[in-house]
Image (cartoon, rainbow, N blue to C red):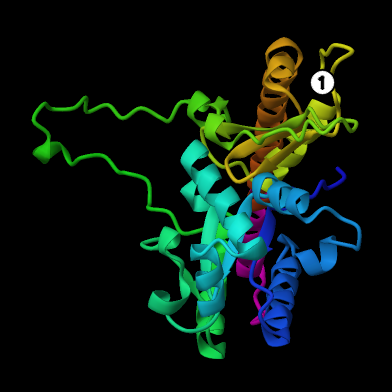
Amino acid sequence: MDSIQQIAPTVFISYAWETEEVKQWVKNLATELRNSGIDAKIDQWEVIPGDQMPHFMEKSVKDNDYVLIICTSKYKSKSENRIGGVGYEGDIMTAEVLQKANHRKFIPILQSGNKDISIPSWLSGKYFVDLSSETHFEKNFEDLITTILNVRERAPELGRIPQKFQSVPSNPIETAPSVEDDKIKIKGILVDEVTTPLNDGTKGSALYKIPFELNKRPDYEWSDLFIQSFNRPPEFTMMHRPGIASVSGNKIYLDGTTIEEVERYHKKPLKLAVEVANRQYAEIQKNRKQAKEREQSLKEQHKRSIDEISRRINFDD
C-alpha cells in the first residue's frame, strides 16, 4: 500500500520587526519547526513586494491551525498600544478569541525578558513557552512540538472500581470489549473551529475548512485508509471533491467546501469512508494477528523438534 503522509499542522508566527537579531531568531525557530514536520509560516518567506499586508495578516491568523506570538518588551508595547502590524494582528487575534473562544490556537512564546515585561496584558494568565535562552529552548522546545502535533501525554484510561468499593455489586461475569468500541466514529462538527471564507471574488474564495471530531485518535494506517476511501468512495455524487480530506490528531478535515455541501453531498461519502477504513483496518489487524500466531506456532514447533531430536542423540554410543 502506498503511504499517504498525514497532513502537517500549520503555524503562523507573529512578531515585531524590532532588530535583525530578533528576525533571525524567528527564522531559526520557524526552520526548527519545519524540520519537525510542522508547516511554519513567517512573513519573511511569505510576503513579497506589492502584497497587501492587512490581507496577509488576516488570512495568516484565521487560516492556520496555531499562531505563535513571539513576546518581547517591544512586542508588548506595540500590542497594547495598537501600533503598526503588531497592533493590527492583536486586534485580529483578540476578535477571533472572542468570536470562537479558541484560546488554545494562540500560544505565547517568551523570546526575551520575563512574563511581566514581555507578554501583552491580553495574553496574561495564558500558559506560555519560555524559549528566552539556549537552556530554556533546549528544555521547552519539545513542549511546543508536542502541543502543536497534539501528542502530549494523556491520562491513562480509567479502570474499573474495585468490587469491594462499589455500592452495588457488579456482575461477576466479565464481558469482552465490544468490537464497536474499537471502531473510529465521527462525533460531530467542531463548529468553533470552522474557518472563515475569504469571499474576495477569487476562485474558491467562498470555500473553507471544516473539522469533524472523532471518538478517538486514529493511527497513521487508519488515516491512510480513510483518505484513500474518501478519494474513491463506494458511492458519491458529481459534487464529490477528492483530495480535500485529511486527518490530524482526533480530527478529520475537509478543506475546500461549505457546510451546505457537507449536508448535501459529503456526509454520506464521509460515513462510508470511515466504515471502509474501519473494515479494512480490522481485516489488516486480524491478518497480522493470525500471521503472528502462525509464526509463534512454527517457532514452538521448531523448538519442540530440536528438543526431541537432541534428546535422541547420544554421544556415548
Residue 56 visible here: yes
The N terminus - image quarter: top right
Left or right, 66 with reference to 201: left
Helix, strand or loop for the magenta stretch, by majority? helix
Tell me which segment is drawn in magenta.
297-317
State whether residue 283 is above or below residue 117. Answer: above
Q: Nearer the viewer, residue 109 or 37?
A: 109
Q: Secondary structure at mark 1?
A: loop
Q: Is residue 188 above or below residue 222?
A: above
User: Which one is nearer the viewer's eye here, 30 or 278?
Assistant: 30
The question of residue 138 being in magenta is answered with: no
Task: Give the percent coordinates (x, y) of residue 214.
Answer: 56, 33
Judge left or right: residue 196 versus residue 77: right
Residue 230, percent from left and from top: 79, 27
Task: Tell me if residue 306 is in the magenta stretch.
Answer: yes
Residue that carries the numbered disc 1 in the rendered image: 233
Image-quadrant location for residue 306: bottom right
Q: Quadrant of the C terminus?
A: bottom right
| x and y percentages locating residue 53 in the rendered image | 78, 56
Q: Is residue 162 above or below residue 141?
A: above
